[in-house]
Image (cartoon, rainbow, N blue to C red):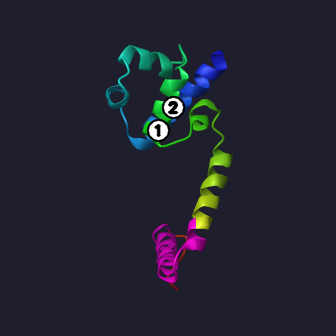
Amino acid sequence: MIENKQVMADNILRFMDAKGIKATDICKALDIKHNTFSDWVNAKTYPRIDKIEKMASFFGVSKADLVEKYHEEEIAKRDELILLREYRNADVETKEMVKRILLYSRKITGELHDD
């Protein structure tokens, strides 16, 4: 169970960092005692399922995203598939805008030169 506690702790901290959320924000929003939350993020204890569900909802992720080990490659593939589906379903104007944004991004990062 120690590994599960650490996985949960790592995932909570990753989502907090990604969304710029502080522990006090989560504790207040979910009515969780700070000491309890601190034990979760320090892998001392593991939250009950009802708290996992509340945290998942708070972060806008699935319960699995909180309790399973994070694999960056799998997340990237899932994100790519979501973007591809959105692009395919977009209207022509939106597709052109996406192309311009990508082109501009390549220019400002130096990947594309004005020749």
Residue 91: where, in percent of width, then height? 51, 79
Q: Residue at x 52, y 77 (%)?
A: 95
Helix, strand or loop at mark 2: helix
Q: Residue at x 43, y 20 (%)?
A: 37
Where 103 falls versus 7 (above or below)? below
Where 18 falls versus 78 (above or below)? above
Q: Is residue 93 left or right of residue 81?
A: left
| Image quarter (top left, top right, bottom left or bottom right) of the N terminus | top right
Instruction: Specify whether residue 27 is painted magenta.
Output: no
Helix, strand or loop at mark 1: helix
- The quarter holding residue 7 reads top right
Front-most of residues 78 and 72: 78
Crowd rating for badge 1 (residues with CA inside 10 Å; few <14, some 14–19, many 20+): few
Q: What residue sits right under mark 1 in the picture?
A: 57
- Tell me whether circle 2 and circle 1 mark residues in contact (CB < 8 Å): yes
Residue 51: where, in percent of width, then height? 48, 25
Dominant SS of magenta comes to helix
Residue 54: where, in percent of width, then height? 46, 31
Instruction: Write down the region rendered in magenta.
Output: 86-109
What is the number of the mark on residue 53?
2
Q: Residue at x 59, y 22 (%)?
A: 6
Front-most of residues 77 and 52: 52
Instruction: Specify whether residue 99 is painted magenta.
Output: yes
Where 17 falls versus 112 (above or below)? above
Amino acid type, mark 1: Ser
Amino acid type, mark 2: Glu
Residue extending farthest bottom: 115
Give the CA distance from mark 2 to mark 1.
6 Å
